[in-house]
Amino acid sequence: MRLLMFHVEEFWYKPHLEDTKESYKDESFGESVLVWIQSEEKDEEDRVAVLRKMVKNIKWLCKKVDCDNVILHSFAHLGKSKSDPEFADNLIAETAARLLERDIDVSIVPFGMFNEFKMHVMGPSLAKVFKSF
C-alpha cells in the first residue's frame, strides 16, 4: 500500500472523457486531506491489516492538520505493483465508510478515470506525507 497525502487548501478535478457518452461533472473542494492511493498486489493477502493501517494513517494526518474533510483518489502510479482493480475500488469504498463512522467527511474521486486536476497544497511539512506499508 502506498499513500501520498496532501493537506490542500483547494482541489478541483474534471474527468477527462474521450470516446464516451457518459458525462461526469467537475468537482471542487475546499480545505481537505487529499489521499492518492495505490494498492499493491501484496495487499490482497492481508486486506484487514491494510484497511486498518490506511484508516489509521489518514486519521492521524487529519488530526495533525486539524481537518475533517478527506478526498480519496485511486492513483496506480506510485509504484510498480498493482492490485486487482476491483480490490482497489472496494478497499477505497470501505476506507471511506470507516472514516465516515469516525465523523470525517469523505469524497471519492471516480475510480478508473483519467482526470484533469488542480490543487493548492499547504506549505508546512505535514502538508505532504508519503506512507508505504
Image: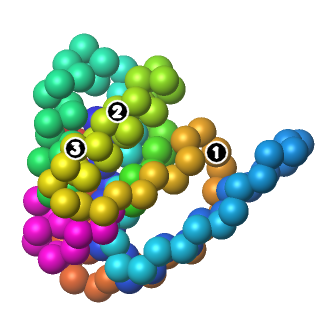
Under circle 2, the secondary element is helix
Residue 69 falls within the magenta-colored stretch: yes
First in sequence: mark 3 or mark 2? Answer: 2
Q: Position of residue 53 (x, y in %)?
A: 14, 40
- In the image, is 52 to the left or to the right of 111? left
Residue 100 seen in the figure: yes
Q: Position of residue 122 (x, y in %)?
A: 32, 83
Q: Identify the disc placed on residue 98.
A: 3
Residue in view at x 23 percent, y 61 percent: 104
Residue range of the region highlighted in magenta in the rendering: 60-70
Q: Name the one closer to the observer, 120 or 69.
A: 69
Q: Identify the disc placed on residue 16.
A: none
CA gap, disc 1 to disc 2? 17 Å
For label 3, count other residues whose C-alpha is less than 10 Å away and answer few (under 14), some (14-19) or many (20+). some
**Quadrant in which the N terminus appears:** top left
Residues at badges 1 and 2 in contact (C-beta under 8 Å)? no
Name the amino acid type tagged 3: Arg
Residue at numbered disc 2: 91
**Quadrant in which the C terminus appears:** top left
Foreground tag (3 vs 2): 3
Q: Identify the disc placed on residue 113.
A: 1
Foreground tag (3 vs 1): 3
